[in-house]
């Protein structure tokens, strides 16, 4: 088995995020959890994953604090996987991936669903990156700079 590189200690926040959610199975598990799936068998049936791969991915998502385990809501002996606030925080990432695919997919007409506002039934607006003052930003409008050093407390 090939050991993959760990990005856990990387200084890049994108690499660090990929450590937790960077494989496609993990993102699809999170997608299904956002749709309400909670049990191992539900994930396995919906995604068609091998049980050993699913078990490893679920364990990793729990270890990274994206999912938590809980007793089954129906009182049975099973455990369920529930999204944590950190897991629900992946929703805008999935929306961004969806919108990117809708814009650049070779066959967008094959996409079976449209993301809509539940109350209004209207399509969701494309995500935008905005400055603190509300201006829409693109890549050319942004840059990276070093994070300020933490302030030291003075003795005394």
Image (cartoon, helix red, strand yellow):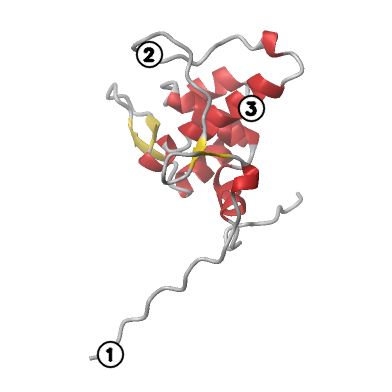
- CA gap, disc 3 to disc 1? 51 Å
**What is the quadrant of residue 38 in the picture?**
top left
- Residue at x 41%, y 35% (from the top left corner): 88
Locate the C terminus and report the quarter of the image it occupies: bottom left
Upstream in the sequence, badge 3 or badge 1?
3
- CA gap, disc 3 to disc 2? 21 Å
Where does label 3 land, which residue? 100
- Badge 3 crowding class, 10 Å Cα cut-off, few under 14, some 14 to 19, many 20 or more, is few
Check disc 2 and report its element: helix, strand or loop.
loop
Upstream in the sequence, badge 3 or badge 2?
3
Q: Residue 118 carries which label?
A: 2
Upstream in the sequence, badge 2 or badge 1?
2
Residue 117 visible in the current orientation: yes
Q: Is residue 153 above or below residue 34?
A: below
Q: Is residue 23 above or below residue 127?
A: below
- Residue at x 71%, y 23% (from the top left corner): 104
Would residue 63 be found to the left or right of residue 56 on screen? Answer: left
Q: Mark 3 touching mark 1, by CB under 8 A?
A: no
Q: Nearer the viewer, residue 25 or 133?
A: 133
- Where residue 138 appears, as percent x and y from the top left, is 60, 40
Where does label 1 land, which residue? 155
- Badge 1 crowding class, 10 Å Cα cut-off, few under 14, some 14 to 19, many 20 or more, is few
Would residue 40 be found to the left or right of residue 76 on screen? Answer: right
Q: Which of 101 and 148 is in front in this view?
A: 148
Check disc 1 and report its element: helix, strand or loop.
loop
- Residue at x 53%, y 35% (from the top left corner): 93
- Badge 2 crowding class, 10 Å Cα cut-off, few under 14, some 14 to 19, many 20 or more, is few
């Amino acid at each position: 088995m090939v050991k993959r590189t760990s990005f856990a200690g990387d200084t890049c926040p994108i690499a660090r995020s990929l450590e937790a959610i960077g494989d496609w199975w993990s993102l699809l598990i999170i997608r299904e959890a956002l749709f309400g799936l909670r049990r191992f068998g539900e994930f396995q049936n919906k995604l068609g994953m091998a049980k050993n791969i699913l078990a490893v991915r679920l364990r990793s998502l729990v270890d990274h604090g994206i999912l938590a385990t809980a007793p089954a809501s129906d009182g049975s002996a099973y455990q369920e996987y529930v999204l944590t606030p950190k897991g629900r925080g992946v929703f805008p990432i999935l929306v961004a991936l969806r919108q990117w695919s809708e814009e650049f997919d070779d066959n967008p007409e094959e996409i079976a669903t449209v993301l809509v506002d539940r109350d209004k039934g209207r399509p969701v607006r494309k995500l935008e990156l905005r400055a603190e003052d509300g201006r829409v930003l693109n890549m050319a409008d942004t840059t990276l700079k070093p994070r300020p050093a933490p302030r030291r407390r003075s003795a005394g």
